[in-house]
Image (cartoon, rainbow, N blue to C red):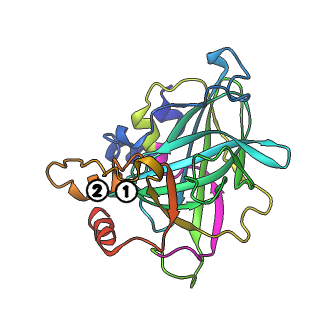
Amino acid sequence: MGLACRLIAGALAASLLFLAGCASEVSPLSPALPGSALAVSTSDPAQRATVVLVATIEGLQCGEGRIVLARAVGAGFERVTDVSVPASYAGRSPVGVVLLAPGDYHVVSYACRNGANVTYLGTGGPEGQIPWTAAAYDHSLATFTAGRGETLIAGGLRIKRQPGSGSLLDPADRAIGLLAEGLSPAELATLAAANPDLTGDLVARPMVLSPGADKGNRLAKCALVVDGAGADTKPRKRKAKGDAPALAALTGPVVPANACRKGKGLGPALDQLVEQVN
């Protein structure tokens, strides 16, 4: 039986039709970082799990998303890898796919990038650290277990806006709520259309929120910059064809940043670009 039949039955069949051309909405397989103890815990690639997951911030579309996965070490969490999620503009429903050794994993950070502007939840390292590049993190947002050789649909981490907590484009003090749930019908259809031959024991086992993860969280913002010797480096220009200049401006490429400095929100010009591509 094909992946579409295993993932989506009956009511979801129609979703596959309108999303049949959405292969670009699924991230390439992201191998765990070389040298990670968890990543090399099995020498047989066939025993690794294929994990499908996503994260979203309510009301905010992203040129790229980054989900950081870690394992518990002592009182903290050691980074294993980050999973890239493609652009979510224009009604797209992208998902991320990653190959992992069997074991328990924690989602410790999610970042939504639009050009050089980053909105994120969960970070580690010193002030100015790019949110998805820290070696260690203090808190877990959600957790899941990847089984040996299985294809795990780990679901989505949904970051919800709290009513009356301020402007979306100036989220430094925004209170948020968290929800862990299965993939949406559109996300499942995206996966099925892009990976018709995905194999393995298909398991739908959504991640669960970590204890206390849904309390006291705040979204933060920063802007990717180049510090030090390369500070004078100018952003590389990307030519956009047809009606895609706004999308190109938001998805990059950006300067080869080595820091992310806190900002007050998206500027007016970028606000307009967000409106154009949504």
Q: In which quarter of the image is residue 146?
A: top right
Q: Mark 2 points at which residue?
A: 249
Which numbered disc covers residue 115? 1
Query: Which region of the structure is painted magenta?
Result: 170-188
Q: Rounded to the nearest whole Å, what is the CA distance between mark 2 and mark 1? A: 6 Å
Q: Earlier in the sequence, mark 2 or mark 1?
A: 1
Disc 2 marks a residue whose amino acid type is: Ala
Along the viewing direction, whichever of 267 and 31 lies nearer the viewer: 267
Q: Residues within 10 Å of mark 1 (few under 14, many from 20)?
A: many
Give amino acid for label 1. Gly
Question: Residue 246 appears at what percent x and percent y?
Answer: 25, 59
107 to 21, vertically: above or below: below
Residue at the (52%, 52%) spot, across then down: 184
Instruction: Work out whether residue 33 or residue 11 is closer to the camera in this orientation and state it.
Output: 33
Residue 195 visible somewhere in the drawing: yes
Q: Residue at horizontal 34%, vertical 71%?
A: 271
Please tell me whether residue 41 is drawn above or below residue 155 in the rendered image: above
